[in-house]
């Protein structure tokens, strides 16, 4: 049975964010303040470092909690507390479970999304990361419940996240910094939705047998 390695997930998310930092910053320059790439780069680098130095003896849930705390403490922008809370909630949802396998991952992503919504109060259609993470969690759960292999479930979640991120382009932002632009936020992809695609797709490269 495949499982997701938390350390590998965070390594892969970090690598993806570093590789695409300029694109994320460009998206955030169009409708925000141009710091999204740097925020996530700094945050995920700190997460990788924290897991390397203090994560060895921890169960997967505790590793996710450590990752979340690190993001909250290292990232000044909105995305730090939001993804930080998400990972902490994901970790809490796992309790002392030994492995992040299909149903545990579906529960963890649901908990992550619930944490983001509780903190940021955004709904689908507000042009935020929620527009990518909501369809991703739904697609993952549906695939897991249909008995699909975890790799396929993650691929479905990644596709749903991509579609969700694209769906933010014609929307007017109703939450976060981009909402200050009003109608001028229309026609641009939301940076947080774009980085959510990277974080979800990283799951697929963090699978172990
Ligand atoms: P900041 O907006 O503080 O500069 P970032 O640039 O790192 O922080 O992150 C911006 C992203 O955060 C947005 O593109 C959006 O996806 C997300 N975001 C902002 N506010 C909210 C919110 N209230 N709920 C959910 N996501 C939000
Ligand atoms: Mg910003």
Image (spheres, rainbow, N blue to C red):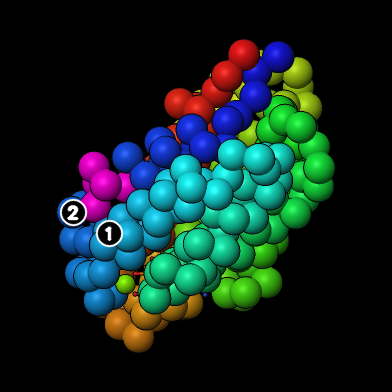
Q: Is residue 13 on the magenta stretch?
A: no
* Quarter of image, res 22: bottom left
Mark 2 crowd level (few <14, some 14–19, many ≥20, 10 Å Cα): some
Vertically, is 100 above or below 149?
Answer: below
Q: Name the spot of residue 129 as percent of width and height, x first.
A: 48, 59
Q: Name the spot of residue 108 as percent of width and height, x first.
A: 70, 46
Looking at the image, which residue sits at the far bottom?
180
Between disc 2 and disc 1, whose residue precedes? Answer: 2
Q: Element at badge 1?
A: helix
* Nearest the eye: 205 or 132: 205
Span shown in magenta: 16-21
Quadrant housing the N terminus: top right
Q: Name the spot of residue 166 as percent of width and height, x first.
A: 37, 49
Looking at the image, which residue sits at the far right?
96
* Nearest the eye: 160 or 201: 201
* Quarter of image, res 138: top right
Q: Name the spot of residue 23 as percent of width and height, x first.
A: 21, 52
Q: Quadrant of ligand 2?
A: bottom left
* Nearest the eye: 182 or 131: 131
Q: Residue at x 57, y 74 (%)?
A: 120
Q: Is mark 1 within 8 Å of ligand 1?
A: no
Q: Is residue 18 on the magenta stretch?
A: yes
Image marks 2 and 1: residues in contact by CB distance under 8 Å: yes
Q: Identify the residue under disc 2.
A: 22
* Nearest the eye: 22 or 190: 22
Q: Main secondary structure of the magenta part?
A: helix
Q: Is any atom of residue 164 visible in this view?
A: no
Q: Residue at x 67, y 43 (%)?
A: 58
Q: What's the mark number on residue 123?
A: none
Q: Identify the residue under disc 1.
A: 37
């Amino acid at each position: 049975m495949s499982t997701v390695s938390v350390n590998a997930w965070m390594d892969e998310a970090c690598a993806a964010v570093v590789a695409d930092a300029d694109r994320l910053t460009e998206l955030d320059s169009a409708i925000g303040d141009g710091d999204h790439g740097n925020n996530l780069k700094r945050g995920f680098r700190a997460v990788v470092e924290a897991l390397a130095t203090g994560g060895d003896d921890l169960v997967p849930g505790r590793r996710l909690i450590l990752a979340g705390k690190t993001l909250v403490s290292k990232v000044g922008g909105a995305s730090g507390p939001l993804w930080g809370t998400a990972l902490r909630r994901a970790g809490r949802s796992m309790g002392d479970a030994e492995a992040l396998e299909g149903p545990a991952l579906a529960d963890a992503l649901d908990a992550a999304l619930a944490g983001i919504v509780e903190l940021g109060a955004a709904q689908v259609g507000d042009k935020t990361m929620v527009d990518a993470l909501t369809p991703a969690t739904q697609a993952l759960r549906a695939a897991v419940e249909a008995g699909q292999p975890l790799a396929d479930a993650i691929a479905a979640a990644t596709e749903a996240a991509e579609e969700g991120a694209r769906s933010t382009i014609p929307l007017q932002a109703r939450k976060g910094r981009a909402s200050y632009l009003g109608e001028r936020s229309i026609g641009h992809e939301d940076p947080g939705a774009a980085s959510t695609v990277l974080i979800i797709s990283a799951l697929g490269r963090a699978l172990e047998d």
